[in-house]
Amino acid sequence: MDWIKLSLVYLPLAVPVSDAKVLTGRQKPLTEIAFIFAELRTRDGHEGVGFGYSKRAGGPGMYAHAKELAPNLLGEDPNDIARLFTHLLWAGASMGRSGLTTQAIAPFDIALWDLKAKRAGLPLAKLLGAQRNSVQCYNTSGGYLHTPLEQVLRNVGISRESGIGGIKIKVGQPDIATDLKRVAAVRELLGPDFHLMVDANQQWDRTTAQRVGRRLEEHNLTWIEEPLDAYDIEGHAALAASLDTPIATGEMLTSFGEHAQLIMGNASDFVQPDAPRVGGITPFLQIMQLADFKGRKLAPHFAMEIHLHLAAAYPQEPWLEHFEWLEPMFNERLQLKDGRMWVPDRPGLGFSLSEQSLAWTADSAEFGKRP
């Protein structure tokens, strides 16, 4: 590895976003997302791009730790991705092997996989051994709690007409009756068989989750997401065992080890890892292997530009979460058709940074010999 560039980029959101954690005062509305981009180049001219992100606090901390880690890659063979992941993990191990330390590794690990696939002239999905050329795709961004029901229904109609394969809306209102009314209205609009998911964002306690889960059974939901605290493995397992509706969780976990506890604890029907949060593609592939072995379904969280390739390589039919938020950051677009997102034929992850991403850059740092 001859040259590395890190960039801290802030993506502004057109409308502040609120979910159940905002309504309960745990968090403020989301107004921007911090991204850490890593651009790598080898001495023979091969390049790779990867990113991590943080919603609300944490971006500057991730960026600072990534700058500490970057010199460890100079002069290393980019083929040795697993070894380099371990090397970076132990470089910051005194701060722990989950959380910010692993999330700061993700931009490098993802960029290394992008570079490897580009050098092979293959989309990353093909390099990993794709099971399919497209992945069923659902939309989240039209059903937040801050959105009035009338607008949610308009958004649902627009999303379905655009070719989306499923709709997810947020629940977790202080008044459970409001949640039930919103879900019933969306189900009526979509009809009985269209895929519908709900997401409580860790809002409920065990009793509430059980009671609301039973009330939601009639709506034939594809899953109930994050009904409980992300680390309540026992509670999620009890829900998964008692409800007909599948349980989905895992997006807030930040290492393979945490996901292994979730999977081995039978705590969900769908696992929802997030490659930038768990440390990159290397630990995500470990999660995929264990999840498939234990018969779990896969629905990665956010970052569809990365997760499309990983989901395409999962043995069981997965779901992909559609977020259009990141589109201004890249020059390329993904194709949505017939309820599915199609794997691009471009090498690597198939995206490059746009001029707009440069305009939103708050800071950058370079390491090694500039090409």
Image (tube, rainbow, N blue to C red):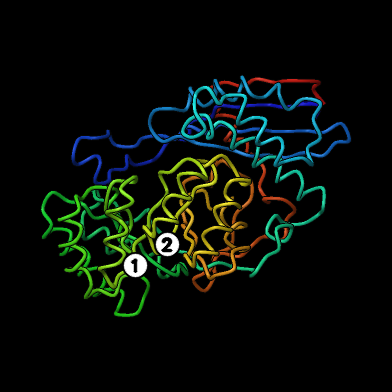
The structure residue drawn at horizontal position 27% and vertical position 73%, both measured from the top left corner, is 189
Callout 1, which amino acid?
Answer: Pro
User: Going by the image, does 324 lie left or right of 89?
Assistant: left
Q: Residues within 10 Å of mark 2 (few under 14, many from 20)?
A: many
Name the secondary structure under disc 2: strand
User: Going by the image, does 269 lie left or right of 91?
Assistant: left
Callout 2, which amino acid?
Answer: Phe
Horizontal and vertical percent for residue 69?
64, 24
Q: Residues within 10 Å of mark 1 (few under 14, many from 20)?
A: many
In the rendered image, which quarter contains the C terminus?
Answer: top right
The structure residue drawn at horizontal position 71% and vertical position 46%, both measured from the top left corner, is 114
User: Going by the image, does 113 lie left or right of 370?
Assistant: left
Query: Which disc is residue 270 wearing?
Result: 2
Dots 2, 1 in contact, CB < 8 A: yes
Image mark count: 2
The structure residue drawn at horizontal position 65% and vertical position 20%, both measured from the top left corner, is 365
Q: Which residue is mark 1?
A: 246
Horizontal and vertical percent for residue 368?
77, 20
- From the viewer's side, name the closer residue of 2 and 364: 2
